[in-house]
Amino acid sequence: MGARRLWDHLQEHPVGGGLVAVPFVLIVTITSLDIFTGRDVQLGPLLVIAPALTASLAGPRLTALAGVLAVAAQVFIAAFLGDLTTTNRVAQIIALTALSALAVFMRFVRERRDRALSRARSVAEAAQRVLLRPPPRRIGPLQVAWLYMSAEDEAEIGGDLFAFARATHAATRVIIGDVRGNGLAAIGEASLVLGAFREGAHRYATLPGLVTALEDSVSRNLEDVADTEHDVGEHFITCLVLEIPDDALAAAEVINCGHPPPLLVHDQQVTSLYARQPLPPLGVCERSIEDDRVDPFAFTGGDMLVLYTDGVIEARSPSGAFYPLAERVASFPTTSPDTLLHHIHRDLLAHIGGQPADDAALLVIERTPSHRPRLTPRPTDGHHRHHPGGAGT
């Protein structure tokens, strides 16, 4: 039965199976050499290598099989050489049996721990996917590509956030933000902002109304979700909130709450859309957002927006240089959002020379040239006024 299990493992795992066969080859080799050298040189104690090596390559069953075969080989060697009942041989057999049993026990404990870790990781990944829902590759007239790199090992998300939502009128709303701090400790604050955005994106007719709702939600609930036990400093969230109408002739709008400016790629030219009057980050002060804090800009067919968090532009090379995102974007082909994102990602990792020390998020949004706008009237409220198109620089 043990041989059949070994063969089944080799068939199911051809790459790993080749390595699993090594301990059993060692048993045969050591046994043959020990018999050949006779009583003068005793190689039998080396048989303990087999169960120890198997424990690092396979499960407890194969480890037990290797242990049994190693003990049987030691008994066979002693019987063949005629010293089975000597004190030395008996001690070797007992020691080999005990060490083999210990290897099986440790492999069993490790397998249980691995299963528990795998289940916990699956639950964490599911929770993270719910929190940071992957945006659709196409929403309205927009094509989207995104990238998220977490500074926390084994985590898919941290303190950076982004989300897309359709407004009640013909427009798409986007948020990208950065919680002070990084890793798993910042997830609570990220979830607060994302929840407020998803709830408010289709309820408020104007961008200032939506940002006011975000500020209100953060101000009321930040203390409940912030990790104040491990981080007693000030907590806040920088963000950009955008509205991109389906009509390519209408101006897009952005409100900047202390966040790095988006990059607009138009006719191979890259422009940083600096805010004329940037707002403080969410959570710093509770206030109503006025219309004059909105920055309109033209976003026509074929244009791309690059949204990012400071984990990208503050990524340092081994020599300490920051990553020059705008300069690099200008040098990359912009045939599609996926192509541009791929070049940025590869270049960023090469610049860092490893994994990022901070959470980093990137969004590339393109308005497809062929989209025809829907003639849906835009609702207005008392706080909204129309802004003519123009690039905010």
Image (spheres, rainbow, N blue to C red):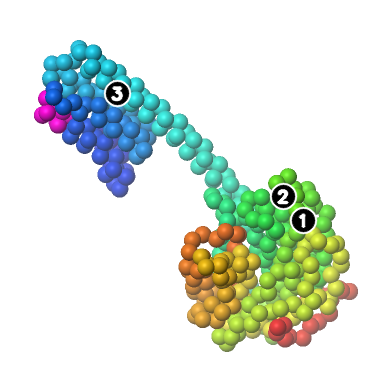
Residue sitting at x 22%, y 35% = 26
Is 330 above or below relative to 208? Answer: below
At mark 3, the secondary structure is helix
Q: Cα distance, mark 1 to mark 2? A: 8 Å
Query: Is residue 16 rendered to the left or right of residue 363?
Result: left
Give the image location of residue 61, x and y in percent: 35, 30
Question: As rendered, which of 311 and 374 lies closer to the eye?
Answer: 311
On residue 234, which mark appears?
Answer: 1
Residue 36: in magenta span: yes
Residue, disc 3: 96
Question: What amino acid type should be assigned to the residue bearing mark 2?
Answer: Asp
Q: Which residues are magenta?
A: 31-38
- Please state which amino acid type lies under the numbered disc 3: Leu
User: What's the amino acid at mark 1?
Assistant: Glu
Packing grade of label 2 (10 A; few <14, some 14-19, many >=20) is: few
* C-alpha distance separating marks 2 and 3: 52 Å
Task: Please check the rendered image and state whether residue 377 is part of the magenta-colored stretch, yes or no.
Answer: no
